[in-house]
Amino acid sequence: MADEERPQMKKPSFPISDRLLTYLRQYRRERQLPVSYDRLNAFEESCPLVDDEGESTLWDSVIYSRLEMSSLHDDLKRVYAQLRTAGDTSVLQHVYVDRIDYCSFGNSAPFRIRIVNAYNDNADYFYIKRGDASRVYGLELEHLLSPNRMNYFTCGNTLVEEHVAGIPGNIFIESWLGRKRSELNPVRVAKELVKFNERCFIRLLGDMRSYNFVMVVTPDFEGAQLRLRAMDFDQQSYEGRMNFYRPQFFPENREFALYCIKHLQQETAHQYQREEQVAILHRAAITEEKLGMLLEAMALDEISPMEHREQLREALAEHFKRDAYLKCKTMGELVRENLETIRIKAASAPRGTMPPILH
């Protein structure tokens, strides 16, 4: 393991630029919503939320005035309907808002809304957060370049996201990784860790410590399949330290890194790394128009201090042995250059046939 990779200070929020807003409107990510972040922020009281074992969490349950509560719950159900049923509230008459939680920890200071089905007590969640350009870029890059689809939309300075279900990475380490689970194939687990690490590095998603991603376990006829999903996108392309975008270097992920070393030979790890690079290029080619428009907006957006961008471009130029990085002036250009780097590598490999992308 290398030195600790932590953000040096709390990342500021960046406003959604006109170019990014144009993208969001064109692809129907920008919506009119009956609830804003500021409206939720006007709660009157709060009380600490504890887990099933009575331990404190980072969340507080919030309470609003009696005059506001009923209409707020109705409007939150309308927001939920936009997430789940394209705005059709007729099929959601049996759901109700059970609880609204607030977390002051983290950059987005989110509200978490707990929705319950009155017929079977099944619960679902969604989040309302402050709009932040960094997070929006992170969500959309995840949607376009990863195997995961992200359901979210914006309304001015408000961001609505669906819940990413899975086992938090830190809980997976405690409850699964150190125990022999017959349904888990160690090589499959290590393979997905390598691929996740590569995805974060290429698209410059930072701060993927174990509690910022989840493990999705799917039963299969030959044991369980596993996929890692990021659930925190605040640190998209902000920090200047290269290893901040490589989950393997966080001390919180040490057990995962050692697990990969134990179960994968170096040649096999390299194979899985290249597989993910090629998969990213295929996804980029399929979404070329959308990705090009997104990266054009990102390339003109200053979502990181100049010193961070200069530090990162020099590190990437040294890492990949490509001086082209030194010409990049923004984080968006660095993401685009990472894609070009793996395209060149794929094209120069034997029988490489990857098409040029994102000129």
Image: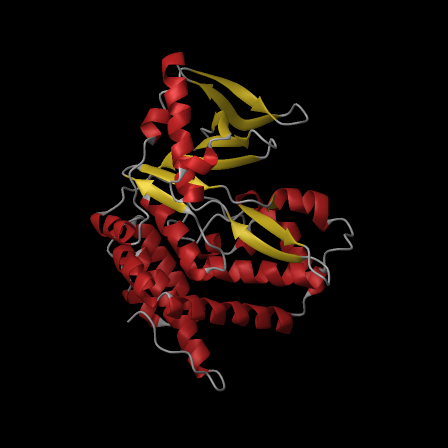
Q: Residue at x 62, y 43 (%)?
A: 170
Horizontal placement of 104 versus 255: left or right? left
Which residue extends farthest top?
66
Q: Residue at x 47, y 31 (%)?
A: 93
Residue 39 in which image quadrant: top left
Q: Split into 4 quadrants, where in the image is the C terminus?
A: bottom left
Would you say residue 321 is visible in this rendering? Answer: no
Horizontal placement of 133 versus 282: left or right? left
Which residue extends farthest front?
90
How many numbered marks have been drawn onto this rendered protein structure? Answer: 0
Which residue extends farthest left?
18
Rendered location of residue 235, percent (x, y): 42, 47
Would you say residue 184 is visible in this rendering? Answer: yes
Say above or below: 314 vs 58: below
Rendered location of residue 101, percent (x, y): 48, 27
Instruction: Depth check: give the residue in front, 212 or 286.
Output: 286
Rendered location of residue 344, percent (x, y): 40, 77
Instruction: Depth check: give the residue in front, 14 or 29.
Output: 29
Instruction: Depth check: give the residue in front, 289 or 328.
Output: 289
| Colour treatment of the image | secondary structure
Which residue extends farthest bottom?
351
Q: Split into 4 quadrants, where in the image is the N terminus?
A: bottom right
Say above or below: 310 vs 97: below
Say above or below: 59 vs 284: above
Horizontal placement of 100 versus 237: left or right? right
Residue 339 in which image quadrant: bottom left
Rendered location of residue 294, percent (x, y): 30, 58
Q: Residue at x 57, y 55 (%)?
A: 248
